[in-house]
Every structure is written in structure tokens, then in C-alpha cells.
């Protein structure tokens, strides 16, 4: 049965090359039907053993076999290259199923995400430690978290080279502590943060303007953006 089916496959390939009208002729569908019927027909069992439940796998294997046999005649160079790939895989120690490869790749991706989250947590802890060690004042506090962290790190490096510890912040003139409208706008947009002196001044100013309706802890809990927004709102209202 297999030899006859293979013979029909060879005949169909030869007819396809010899006759350009073969694909549209009546013989091609008859050959296709006969080949498919021969490949899917149940062989007569020699005993009472049940047919193994691999019908779908057999169909897929047959389809690949059929495509490869046709490539041998229509595209011999591609057929030779495909054969080389098969031989390389057969010489490999193990053949991994594509589904298994996908599962392995998903596992690698999950571990990469976990490592990335761990690195982000370490970076946040480092920035927090730098902020606790070095307080930025005035224009030094302007910029993103990365830029501020780089400035703090540079201050630490400069102090280590000079010796004698970190420089003490200079006392600020009380009249120069109050942030300008432009600086308030920058803080409200998250472009910069208040210095510790500016924050203290803003808390006191908001408490006075709101007739002490809120205490300092509440104002500090809202953050610099909310504090700046309250002062900007008073500026716009003319108070």
C-alpha cells in the first residue's frame, strides 16, 4: 500500500512538471483523492489491538512528507538545504519540542522581569539613602530623580576627595527663602522639589493663609506638589 501511494505521488509530481494544464485537469483531483484515501485508510488489523490514537499526528507527518517529496522535484536546492537541516537536528543530543521551547522562553522572561524588579528596588533604596545623606538646596534640587541622585553622588565624591566630611549648608536669608511663582510652578509640575528651608517656609505660609485649618503633618503628607498648588492658587486669587 505504501509503495503504491509513493508511486502515485511520483506520478503526480512528474505530471505537474510535464503538463502545465495538469493542475486544472480532471486527473489531478482524482490522484489527490486516491492518495489521501490510501494514506488515511485503516489497515486490516492482524489482531484485536486497537489503533493508536495518533491520527492527527500521522496526518501532519504525511502532509510534511508530501510537501518534501514535491520539493525534491520542484525545488531541488531547497530540498537539499532542508535535508541538511534535518540531518543536523538528528545529530543533536536532544530534540526539543517547539512547545517546550516556548515554555522555557516564558520562564526565562519571568526570571528577567523578577531580576528587573529587584534592580529597581535596589535603585530606589540607593536613591533614598543618598537623599538621606546629602540634602540638596535651591537649584540643586531641580531635575529628575536620576539627576538629583547624580548631584548627591558627586557631592559625596567631592567631600571624600577633600576630606573633612560633607559641607554644612549655609544659612539662608529668611527674605530669600520664599520660592518665586516660577519655582512654585516647577514644583507643582514635578520638575523640582522644595529644599528643606523652602518646604518649612511654605508650610508656615499655608497655615497662616488658611487660618490654621490644617496642621504641618497634614500639609507635609500631601507632598510638595500639593503644597505648591495651594500657594499658586492664593497667588492667582490675589491673596
Image (cartoon, helix red, strand yellow):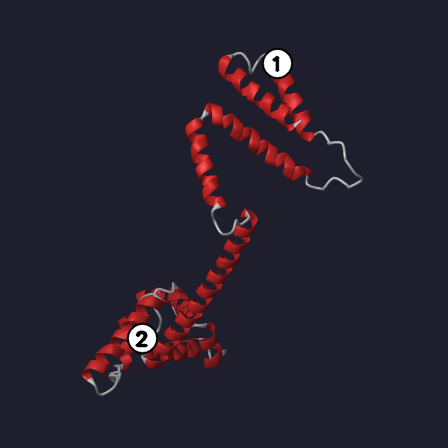
Considering depth in this image, is 184 or 233 the residue closer to the camera?
Answer: 184
- Dot 1: within a 10 Å radius of its alpha carbon, few (fewer than 14), some, or many (20 or more) residues? few
Q: Is residue 142 visible?
A: no
- Give the residue number, with chain letter if any, for mark 2: 178
Instruction: Tell me: 69 left or right of 237.
Output: right
Q: Quadrant of the N terminus?
A: top right
- Residue occupying the point 71% across, 29% down: 41
Q: Residues within 10 Å of mark 2 (few under 14, many from 20)?
A: some
Any mark on residue 167, and which? none
SS at badge 2: loop
Q: Quadrant of the C terminus?
A: bottom left
Compared to residue 196, the image places residue 91 above or below, namely above
**Quarter of the image where one finds residue 170:** bottom left
Q: Position of 69 compared to 224: left or right? A: right
Which secondary structure lies at badge 1? helix
- Labels 2 & 1 near each other (Cβ < 8 A): no
Q: Please name whichever residue, 225 or 107, is drawn nearer the observer in this view of the structure.
A: 107
Q: Which residue is mark 1?
A: 27
Amino acid at each position: 500500500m505504501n509503495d503504491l501511494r509513493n508511486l502515485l505521488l511520483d506520478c503526480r509530481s512528474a505530471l505537474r512538471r510535464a503538463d502545465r494544464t495538469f493542475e486544472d485537469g480532471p486527473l489531478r483531483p482524482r490522484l489527490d483523492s486516491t492518495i489521501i484515501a490510501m494514506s488515511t485508510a485503516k489497515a486490516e488489523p492482524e489482531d484485536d489491538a486497537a489503533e493508536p490514537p495518533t491520527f492527527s499526528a500521522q496526518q501532519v507527518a504525511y502532509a510534511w512528507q508530501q510537501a518534501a517529496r514535491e520539493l525534491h522535484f520542484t525545488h531541488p536546492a531547497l530540498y537539499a538545504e532542508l535535508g541538511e537541516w534535518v540531518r543536523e537536528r538528528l545529530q543533536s543530543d536532544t530534540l526539543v519540542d517547539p512547545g517546550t521551547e516556548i515554555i522555557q522562553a516564558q520562564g526565562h522572561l519571568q526570571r528577567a522581569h523578577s531580576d528587573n524588579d529587584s534592580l529597581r528596588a535596589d535603585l530606589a533604596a540607593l536613591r533614598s539613602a543618598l537623599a538621606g545623606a546629602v540634602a540638596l538646596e535651591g537649584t540643586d534640587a531641580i531635575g529628575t530623580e536620576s539627576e538629583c541622585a547624580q548631584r548627591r553622588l558627586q557631592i559625596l565624591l567631592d567631600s571624600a576627595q577633600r576630606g573633612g566630611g560633607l559641607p554644612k549648608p549655609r544659612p539662608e536669608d529668611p527674605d530669600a527663602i520664599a520660592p518665586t511663582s516660577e519655582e512654585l510652578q516647577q514644583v507643582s509640575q514635578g520638575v523640582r522639589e522644595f529644599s528643606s528651608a523652602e518646604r518649612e517656609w511654605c508650610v508656615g505660609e499655608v497655615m497662616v493663609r488658611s487660618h490654621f485649618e490644617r496642621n504641618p503633618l497634614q500639609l507635609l503628607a500631601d507632598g510638595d506638589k500639593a503644597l505648591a498648588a495651594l500657594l499658586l492658587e492664593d497667588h492667582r486669587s490675589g491673596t
